[in-house]
Image (tube, rainbow, N blue to C red):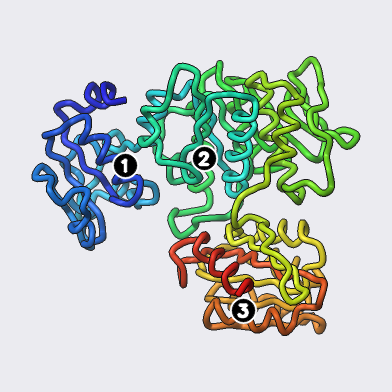
Amino acid sequence: MIEYLRKRFTGKSIVLLGFGREGQASYSRLREAFPGKRLTIADASEAIRDNPLIAHDDAVALITGPGYLEQLQGFDAIFRSPGIPVWQLLQDQNHPGGRIRRDQITSQTEIFLECFAGRVIGVTGTKGKSTTASLIHHILKTAGKDALLAGNIGSPVFHIADLVGPETIVVFELSSHQLEFITVAPHISVLLNLFQEHLDAYESYGQYQQAKVNVTRYQQEEDFLVYNMDDALVSGHVQPFCSHRRCYPFSVAGETGPGSFLRDGWACFSNGRDTVPVWQIHQDRFLRGEHNLKNILAAISVAMIHGIDPESVSDAVATFKGLEHRLEYVGEFGKIHFYNDSIATIPEACMEAVRAIPKVDTLVAGGFDRGIEYDDLASFLGKSGIRNIILAGEAGRRIGGLLEKFGNPDQKLFYINRFDDFREIAFRETLPGHACLLSPAAASYDEFRNFEERGRRFRDLVTH
């Protein structure tokens, strides 16, 4: 990696755009490659000036504050951290900073793929990518493979570059932000689904979809694409590429040719010639719900492509307990079963959680409003049989407004000003023996830094 960075960037001026977790990892790796090279860091936050990582580096220049995007056009390479908005800079000649070129933009993701694409399993989708990436990693490790987990669910890839050996397989969870400017793709790409998400960061839903599709757009003929045949958007986007790479769709609705599907209570895999049963479906499995069946099918396809025997795959699926904050059983308190699904930040994830958890009597939903559509969620909840819906934040108020239109007389709506206020209502209103589910269908950053902090707060409040 170090030699590649030297070859790629010697003689070029570099700016690190964003100095969060990934930006700091990029700085450390670049400083290792270029001990005395001048590096510029651009970030909206003035607080980065006090970051101890760069406190004694005289070769660092800083651009901070509201105008941090207006001084980028003069650099040869812009190391962009995920989520930093640069679309306007690419398109608008009259922007105060001037237009930048696409070939100036790079990232950790792109550099890592340039070095190691042939060893990477890239997993993306609006929902389920953390679970699926973690499950794939668990299957590989159970089978004795040298496997690393990276991305949003693991370490920044620059942190693990030195651990990548000749036999290493890297499972890389990829967000739309990491994918939107790449020009090289993983050897095995997994595209799980497409729903409305992160619309506050994109000019349109279509632009978000195109960023996700980059996971396969730049694959070669010897590469593999595992995709959700049941998702019409996914299937439509990938069809133009399927003649130029090896495609393995998965489906819970019908049998595929090559790929994974359900038959007679088994998750099966076909290589296009032979079909083998891999995992017998259990109703009491750790990964509940139909959405997790799809995640399991995707993971099975990846494992079988890697030549792992069905028995090892089955053992790994049976022992994988899922992720923190995703349909996580907190426990029984006051004769009420509490479930933490804080990672559910879109309506579809909330609906899947309600279907998966038995006897949901109280739902805690809402949070930061990113402008996504809630009509289908409100219609679903109005018919769900849930008696109590506790609604937080601007998103909660908008969901509640839609629910009020349905006028379900058996449903109580509780609007709360602070997330913590859910506790008293949940313990008072939830029927004994039934469940209270946190599945917000909204982002957390009106009150919390991230969904993990929200999930931990939920657990703390119900257990104490």
Residue 36 relative to residue 109: left or right? left
Real-space Cα separation, disc 2 to disc 3, in angstroms:
32 Å
Q: Is residue 410 above or below residue 161?
A: below
Residue behind mark 3: 422
The one of 200 and 9 positioned closer to us in this rendering: 9
Q: Name the secondary structure under disc 2.
A: strand
The residue where tag 2 is placed is 173
Q: Position of residue 141 (x, y in %)?
A: 59, 30
Residue 290 x, y percent position in the rendering? 76, 48
Residue 184 is at least partly visible in this image: yes
- Amino acid at pointer 1: Ala
Point out the frontmost of discs 2 and 1.
Answer: 1
> Upstream in the sequence, badge 3 or badge 1?
1
The residue where tag 1 is placed is 25
Classify the position of the N terminus by image quarter: top left
Q: Position of residue 326 (x, y in %)?
A: 63, 55
Please name the residue shown 56% across and 21% down the image. 223
Q: Which of these two is toward me, 338 or 91? A: 338
CA separation in Å, label 3 and label 1: 38 Å
Above or below, 331 relative to 139: below
Q: Does residue 348 appear in the picture of this structure?
A: no
Task: Determine whether the residue tagged by mark 3 lies in a helix, strand or loop.
Answer: helix
Q: Callout 2, which amino acid? A: Glu
- Residue 247: image tag: none
**Residue at 61 percent of width and 33 percent of height:** 238
